[in-house]
Image: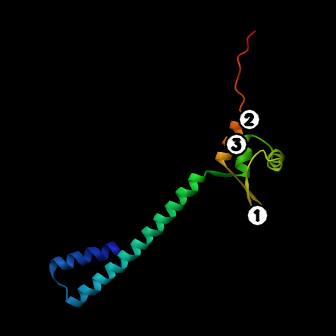
């Protein structure tokens, strides 16, 4: 019997007063056990969501996304990393970039347009 049906039966039985005291105690134990299970699941879900929002705030992309975003080749990305043009993190063979570092790279190399006076 699923939790909702059990709870509905419990409420109906209480209203009809057909419970023996021992049956009532058992039903409340089942309801309490399911409540605790749901509370644990909600806590786990909340923790997962908090972790997810922390990861999102990091705003990281992998090497393939970086190459696509910048419109460069894999070799160019490698050259930029080797020469210190762009900051990155490497875990085993996987490379990650912070979007903030990419923005800094673009800001540092920004060339303001100048009006031509012909």
Q: Which residue is mark 2?
A: 109
Report how far apart the C-alphas of labels 1 and 2 lie in the structure: 30 Å
Residue drawn at 72 percent across, 44 percent down? 68
Query: Of discs 1 and 2, which sits in the foreground?
Result: 2
Q: Quadrant of residue 96?
A: bottom right
Question: Where 72 sits versus 37, above or below?
Answer: above
Secondary structure, mark 2, is loop
Residue 40 as seen in the image, left or right of residue 18: right
Alpha carbon of mark 3 to alpha carbon of mark 1: how far? Answer: 23 Å
Say what secondary structure mark 3 lies in. helix
> What residue would you read off at disc 1?
92
Image quarter (top left, top right, bottom left or bottom right) of the C terminus: top right
Picture coordinates of residue 60, whole percent (x, y): 64, 52
**Extreme residue in the top direction:** 118
Q: First in sequence, mark 3 or 1: give its number.
A: 3
Q: Nearer the viewer, residue 58 or 26?
A: 58
| Residue bearing mark 3 | 69
Residue 55, quarter of picture: bottom right
Whether residue 2 appears in this view of the structure is: no
Vertical comparison of 79 with 52: above or below: above
Quadrant the N terminus occupies: bottom left
Of residues 65 and 16, the one drawn nearer to the viewer in this rendering: 65
Query: Residue at (25%, 88%) from the top-left corner?
Result: 23
Q: Secondary structure at mark 1?
A: loop
The mark total stands at 3
Residue 58 pos. (x, y %) = 60, 53
Q: Is residue 66 above or below residue 30?
A: above
């Amino acid at each position: 019997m699923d939790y909702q049906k059990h709870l509905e039966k419990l409420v109906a039985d209480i209203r009809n007063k057909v419970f023996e005291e021992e049956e009532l105690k058992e039903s409340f134990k089942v309801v309490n056990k399911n409540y605790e299970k749901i509370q644990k699941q909600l806590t786990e879900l909340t923790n997962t969501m908090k972790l997810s929002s922390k990861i999102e705030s990091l705003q990281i992309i992998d090497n393939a996304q970086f190459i696509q975003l910048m419109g460069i080749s894999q070799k160019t990305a490698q050259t930029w990393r080797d020469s210190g043009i762009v900051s990155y993190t490497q875990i085993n063979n996987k490379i990650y970039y912070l979007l903030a570092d990419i923005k800094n790279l673009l800001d540092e190399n920004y060339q303001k347009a100048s009006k031509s006076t012909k």
